Image (tube, rainbow, N blue to C red):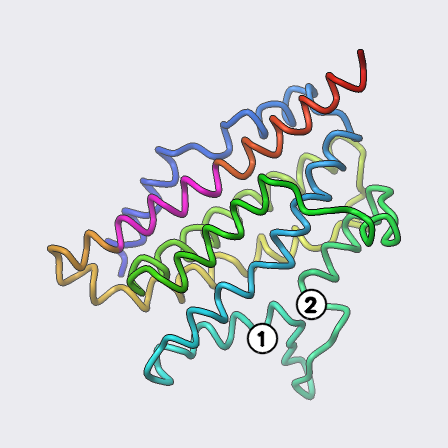
């Protein structure tokens, strides 16, 4: 397992999602607050959708042991908490916490009701659903796992950046601070499900590797495409 996680970390570092155009623009102030708002409003559709490919993958699992990590992850996605009496708290569902994050940026919930999912996030969502429905389970688990792994670092970067740029106070920050904490654990749970395939080597390991590379590709493209679409719209409306 340690060898697998080490390989995943090396692949994520080599892909360098945090160095792509989206995060570079966010760091060097080429991305304004309004442009960041626009990209995050679209990212909401990815947050809202992410549990659905997981649920599709869970339905393919023949045993409770393989379903367990997905069940736990899905429960947290929907606001499950274990403090005191274990309950589902609707306000802690991840799409709800992301809406609260958008509100701290000045985006009203009513506005989100009228916003349509753009092609960048639709392509990302469709890719994940296709992987979880049609690919070998080793590919699917590895693809979701590396997205969870990468999002932990992305959440830390975004949380620090919106605070540094004065867009959200530390006290107001929601959603990203949660994912900075839990997504590393979720990733480990996903990779535990393919550790045996990784150890077996050969074609089984290759499927895990393919899933990791695919997950990094589609996640990188999502942020690149969100930035490109937003920058293009900004340029058109500014002329």
Q: Which secondary structure class fits the magenta region best? A: helix
Judge the density around disc 2: few (<14), some (14-19), many (≥20) Cα neighbours within 10 Å.
Answer: many
Q: Image height check: is 238 above or below 100?
A: above
| Precedes in sequence: disc 1 or disc 2 | 1
Of 88 and 57, nearer the camera is 57
Left or right, residue 154 beside residue 130: right
Image quadrant in which the N terminus is located: bottom left
Judge the density around disc 1: few (<14), some (14-19), many (≥20) Cα neighbours within 10 Å.
Answer: some
The image shows residue 175 at horizontal and vertical percentages of: 69, 55
- Element carrying mark 2: loop
The answer to whether mark 1 and mark 2 are in CB contact below 8 A is no
The residue depicted at 40 percent of the width and 47 percent of the height is: 215
Image quadrant in which the C terminus is located: top right
Which range of residues does the magenta coloring cover?
208-220
**Residue that sits furthest to the top in the current view:** 239
The image shows residue 197 at horizontal and vertical percentages of: 20, 64
The magenta stretch spans residue 86:
no
Per the image, the residue denoted by label 1 is 75
- Residue 180's label in the rendered image is none
Left or right, residue 210 beside residue 51: left
Q: Splitting the image into 4 quarters, where does residue 40 fall?
A: top right
Per the image, the residue denoted by label 2 is 93
The residue depicted at 88 percent of the width and 53 percent of the height is: 110
């Amino acid at each position: 397992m340690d060898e697998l996680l080490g390989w995943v970390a090396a692949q994520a570092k080599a892909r360098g999602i945090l160095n792509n155009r989206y995060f570079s623009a966010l760091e060097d102030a080429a991305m304004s607050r309004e442009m960041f708002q626009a990209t995050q409003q679209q990212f909401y559709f990815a947050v809202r959708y992410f549990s659905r490919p997981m649920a599709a993958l869970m339905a393919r699992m023949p045993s409770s042991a393989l379903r367990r990590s997905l069940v736990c992850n899905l429960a947290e996605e929907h606001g499950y908490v274990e403090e005191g009496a274990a309950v589902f708290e609707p306000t802690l569902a991840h799409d709800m916490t992301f809406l609260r994050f958008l509100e701290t940026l000045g985006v009203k919930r009513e506005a989100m009701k009228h916003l349509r999912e753009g092609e960048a996030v639709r392509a990302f969502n469709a890719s994940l659903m296709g992987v979880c429905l049609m690919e070998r389970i080793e590919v699917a688990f590895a693809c979701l796992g590396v997205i969870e792994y990468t999002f932990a670092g992305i959440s830390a970067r975004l949380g620090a950046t919106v605070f540094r740029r004065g867009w959200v106070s530390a006290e107001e920050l929601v959603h990203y601070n949660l994912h900075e904490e839990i997504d590393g654990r979720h990733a480990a749970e996903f990779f535990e499900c393919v550790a045996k395939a990784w150890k077996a080597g050969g074609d089984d390991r290759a499927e895990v590797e393919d899933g990791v590379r695919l997950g990094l590709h589609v996640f990188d493209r999502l942020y690149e495409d969100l930035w490109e679409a937003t920058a293009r719209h900004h340029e058109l409306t500014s002329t």
